[in-house]
Image (cartoon, rainbow, N blue to C red):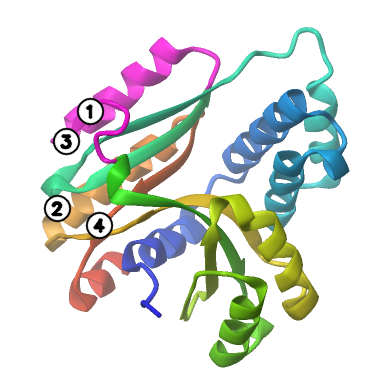
């Protein structure tokens, strides 16, 4: 089983240091509202809403905030958000996927294009880099959930495809379509997951030096700072030495 992404570890540590809680909550609330509006307000009948609520709880979002976000979906004046995916190349030719929920496609596209350009990258057409990634379900657990072997055994029994364990925790991957079934089976064996989400996992990585890796991280920061951007994925890979420098 492959080692966990260095880029993810770097961004995780950095995010823990300077995360803006209100912005995180706003993005989670938007996903809850959109999920409820599309599939109904009953989590038992709406898999996407169940997932959005689980992820909101994983970030310690207050129950009142979650309930308000669900109820907002029933309002006649609720904004209509479109799901948009942007793809392109960042510093060093890295592949980048940006997922957004926006009520103004022109505004969001303009912001994303500007960030790519300023970083020396280029925004491409949808599908321009998507083929370099797999769309998967990612179910994460803290290290306290069990040993690497125990988690691996539980993941295999649950029908997962891969497990990556490092100092940040256990990350279990499965087909996007079977995320609900695998999550349920894992919960029976390991308890509630820390997070459950769909991700774009790179099939191949692009190795960057310290300068280009830093440029890419700044680019990702700028993208994630935009209210409309929900997730950013990249296929960056760096040496252990560069990773240690970037993590500070």
The residue tagged 3 is 121
Above or below, 86 against 237 in this view is above
Which is in the foreground here, disc 1 or disc 3?
Answer: 1
Label 2 environment density (alpha carbons within 10 Å; few <14, some 14–19, many ≥20):
some
> Element type at marker 2?
helix
Residue 212: percent from the left, percent from the top?
Answer: 14, 53
Residue 186 placement: quadrant: bottom right
Which is in the foreground here, disc 3 or disc 2?
Answer: 3
| Highlighted magenta segment, given as a residue range | 102-129
> Element type at marker 3?
loop
Query: Residues at badges 1 and 2 in contact (C-beta under 8 Å)?
Result: no
Query: Residues at badges 4 and 2 in contact (C-beta under 8 Å)?
Result: no
Nearest to N terminus: mark 4 or mark 3? 3
Residue 29: percent from the left, percent from the top?
Answer: 69, 35
The residue tagged 1 is 124
**Going 36% across and 64% down the picture, which residue do you hit?**
10
The residue tagged 2 is 212
Residue 106: percent from the left, percent from the top?
Answer: 39, 11
The residue tagged 4 is 236
**Going 41% across and 20% down the picture, which residue do you hit?**
108
Specify whether 69 is left or right of 221: right
Q: Nearer the viewer, residue 108 or 226?
A: 108
Above or below, 46 against 143 in this view is above
Q: Nearer the viewer, residue 65 or 128?
A: 128
Instruction: Determine the CA span between mark 4 and mark 3.
Output: 14 Å
Which is in the foreground here, disc 4 or disc 1?
Answer: 1
Instruction: Determine the CA span between mark 1 and mark 3.
Output: 10 Å
**Going 61% across and 77% down the picture, which residue do you hit?**
155
Nearest to N terminus: mark 4 or mark 1? 1
């Amino acid at each position: 089983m492959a080692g966990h992404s260095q880029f993810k570890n770097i961004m995780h540590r950095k995010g823990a240091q300077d995360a803006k809680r209100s912005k995180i909550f706003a993005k989670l609330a938007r996903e809850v509202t959109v999920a409820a509006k599309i599939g109904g307000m009953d989590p038992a009948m709406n898999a996407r809403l169940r997932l959005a609520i689980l992820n909101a709880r994983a970030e310690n979002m207050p129950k009142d905030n979650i309930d308000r976000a669900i109820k907002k979906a029933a309002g006649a004046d609720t904004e209509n958000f479109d799901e948009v995916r942007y793809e392109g190349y960042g510093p060093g030719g890295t592949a980048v996927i940006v997922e957004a929920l926006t009520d103004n496609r022109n505004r969001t596209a303009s912001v994303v294009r500007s960030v790519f350009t300023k970083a020396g990258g280029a925004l491409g057409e949808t599908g321009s880099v998507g083929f370099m990634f797999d769309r998967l379900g990612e179910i994460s657990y803290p290290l306290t959930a069990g040993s690497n072997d125990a988690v691996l055994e539980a993941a295999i029994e649950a029908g997962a495809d891969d497990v990556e364990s490092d100092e940040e925790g256990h990350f279990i991957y499965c087909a996007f379509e079977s995320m609900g079934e695998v999550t349920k089976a894992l919960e029976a064996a390991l308890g509630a997951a820390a997070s459950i989400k769909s991700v774009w996992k790179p099939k191949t990585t692009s190795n960057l030096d310290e300068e280009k890796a830093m440029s890419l991280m700044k680019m990702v920061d700028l993208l994630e700072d935009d209210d409309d951007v929900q997730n950013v994925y990249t296929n960056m890979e760096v040496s252990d030495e560069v990773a240690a420098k970037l993590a500070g």
